[in-house]
Image (cartoon, rainbow, N blue to C red):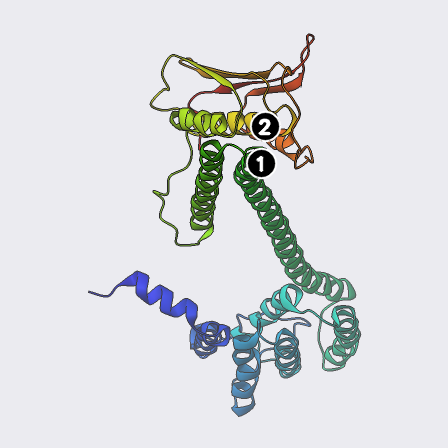
Amino acid sequence: MIDLRRVTDLWQRCDVVVRDLPFGLAMAVTSLLPGLHGKGTQVGDLPARPFDDLALVVIALECLPLAVRRRWPGVCLALVSLGFVLDQLRGYHVFASNAMPIALISAGAHLERHRRVTVLLLSMAYVPLAVALHRLGATERVEGYVVFYLALALAWGIGARLRSTRAAEAERRRHVAEATRAAERTRIARELHDVVTHHVTAMVVQAEAARYLTAAPDRLDATLSAVTDTGRRAITDLRHMLDLLKADHDTDVSLPSAGELRTLVEQTRQAGQPVEFAEEGTPAESAGSAEFVTYRVVQEALTNALKHAHGSRTGVRVRYGEKEIIVEVSTDGSGFRAVSPGGSGRGLAGLRERVDAVGGEFSAGRQAGGGFVVRARIPAGSPS
C-alpha cells in the first residue's frame, strides 16, 4: 500500500515551482476542452472567434507562468497579462484567461519589490487595452470597464491582504520566539545562580574559617574535607544543569526536591551554620514543581544566611499540606559576620519569580527583633 504520509512529505520537499506547475498544466488542458470555449474572464464583449494556432500560444502564456507565481511573481504577472491582452484583443475568451486574477493574487501576496510601480504600470496598461477593444467594436460601456478594473484591483487587494497577514504572523512568531528565548535564558541564569552561589558561598565561608584552624590540625582537616565535598557537589549539580541544556537530554535527569532538604541542611551545618530543621506532614505524590521550588527557597535562604549572618542560629520550617507547602527560614542575627562574597539581590528576586510562577506567595525582610526571615506559600500540585 502507498504510504500517503510519506508521499505528502516528499511532495512538500519538492521545489515550489514543481509544486505549482500541475495547477498551470491542469488549467491549460482544461482550456482545450470544447465545452469550456468562451468560459473565460473577458472584458469588452467582443464576439468570440474559433481557436487557431495563436490561441494555443495565448493559453500557454496564461497558464504555464503560474508555475512560478510564488518564485517569480513579477514574471508570472507580466506573462499572464500579455496572454490576457492577446486573448481579449483576439476574442478567444479561453478558460485560461481566468489565470489573470490568480496571477494578481499571487503577485499581491508574494511580490517583494516594486509593488507600487507594478500597480501603476498595470493601471496605465489597462487604459490602452480598453481603447483598443472599443476600436475593435467592443460593446462594453465605460462603467463596465470601471467595474472590471475594480475586480482586478480586488484580486490584487486579496493578495496584499494575504501578504500582510503572513507578515503579521511571522512577526508574532518572532516575538514569541524572542520571549521564549529570553524566558529560557532567565531560567538558566536563575538555576546557575542557585547552584553556583550556594556551593561557592559555602566554600568561601569554610575556607575563611580554615585560616584560623592552623593550630588545630584535626579541625582544619575536617574543614578542608568539607570544602572538597562542597566543590564536588557543585560540579555534580553543574553537570546536571548541562545535561538539561542538551537538546537530547534524558528526561529522567533528577532535579532537587523537597525530599533532599535534610541533605541541604546538613551541608549548611558543615559550613559552620547552626541550623534547626523541622518538617510537618509529608509531601503530596502529585506535588509537581512545588517540591523543586521549595528546595530552591530553602537553598537560597540558607545561602543568604551563610553570606550575611554566618554563625547565627537559623531555623528552617517546612509544613506540607494537601494543597500547599509553607516554608519559613529565619535567622536571628545573633552570630558574627564572615567575609561575604557579596550579593546582587538576584537570588531573592529569582525566588519571588519562581513562587509567583506557580501561583504562590513570597515575602522576605527583616524581623522586628532583628534577623531576617523568608516565607513562601507554594501551591502543591503545581505543573512542572
Labels 1 and 2: the sequence-earlier one: 1
Q: Which picture quadrant has residue 122? A: bottom right
Numbered tag placed on residue 286 in the rendering: none
Report the residue marked by disc 2: 306
Report the residue marked by disc 1: 201
Q: Is residue 338 above or below residue 36?
A: above
The C terminus is located in which quarter? top left
Q: Is residue 305 above or below residue 30?
A: above
Q: Is residue 99 above or below residue 3?
A: below
Task: Give me the C-alpha separation between circle 1 and circle 2.
Answer: 7 Å
Q: Which picture quadrant has residue 247? A: bottom left
Q: Secondary structure at mark 1?
A: helix
The N terminus is located in which quarter? bottom left
* Residue reaching furthest to the top: 369
Foreground residue among 16 and 355: 355
Q: Is residue 242 above or below residue 139?
A: above
Question: Does residue 382 appear in this view?
Answer: no
